[in-house]
Amino acid sequence: MENNDLEWKKFTTRELEIMLPRTFIGGDPKKDKKTIEEKIAKIPEKYRIYYKNFFKGENCQFMAADTKIDENDPVITHVHTLVQKLPLFSFGMTMEKYLEEVLKRHGRNFEIVEKGVVALRDYQAARVIINIREKKGPFKKPGEIQQITVIFSIKLKTKFWDFFFATTPARYEKEIPIFEQSIQSIVIKG
């Protein structure tokens, strides 16, 4: 299905709005927990564990995952958002410096494919594409690419909003236009 033919759905939380394809489930994992669990219950039983594990993950303001899944994929296509409040002494932090800090947290099994600044509909953002590789052998050397993640970081006053869009290498070419269109729909409230 072409990107233009997709049916889109607006996800709204107290902090933001984002458009994603209708096949996604999600919301604020704390406030929308019951609704998310009801939607996970409608997914075929053999896949439910992927979604249960994903939604009990990080402390995020927003999480969503695509319910179109291929059992051969090691990861589901997903989006999650983190908000980092800057300490008082870091209010003037540049986007480049902030990205360096974010990328340090990803460990050794990733490689930066692309990095730069992009203009979104209402914001300017840093955009980074990274390949995350599996850990192999006793020394945990990077192996095959398991996931490709596109990170958009938006600085608003004293906070950085990080949007992580992730999928498998097999689905990346198909998903990247969806990620790009979705990030253009972002509205950060307040």
Image (cartoon, helix red, strand yellow):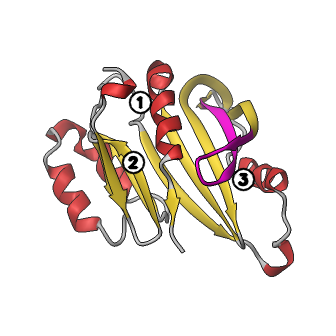
Q: Is residue 19 left or right of residue 52?
A: right
Q: Is residue 66 above or below residue 99?
A: above
Packing grade of label 3 (10 A; few <14, some 14-19, many >=20) is few
Residue denoted by label 3: 102
Q: Is residue 88 above or below residue 78?
A: below
Packing grade of label 2 (10 A; few <14, some 14-19, many >=20) is many
Q: Is residue 124 magenta?
A: yes
Q: In the rendered structure, find residue 120 and report the number of the disc placed on it.
A: none
Q: Is residue 186 above or below residue 179?
A: below
Residue denoted by label 1: 74
Q: Residue at x 51, y 41 (%)?
A: 165
Q: In the rendered structure, find residue 19 and report the number of the disc placed on it.
A: 2
How far is disc 3 from disc 2 in space, using C-alphas?
25 Å
The magenta segment is 117-133
Question: Main structural element of the magenta stretch: helix, strand or loop?
Answer: strand
Packing grade of label 1 (10 A; few <14, some 14-19, many >=20) is few
Q: Residue at x 49, y 28 (%)?
A: 177
Quarter of the image with the N terminus is top left
Q: Is residue 113 left or right of residue 32?
A: right
Q: Position of residue 152 (x, y in %)?
A: 63, 47
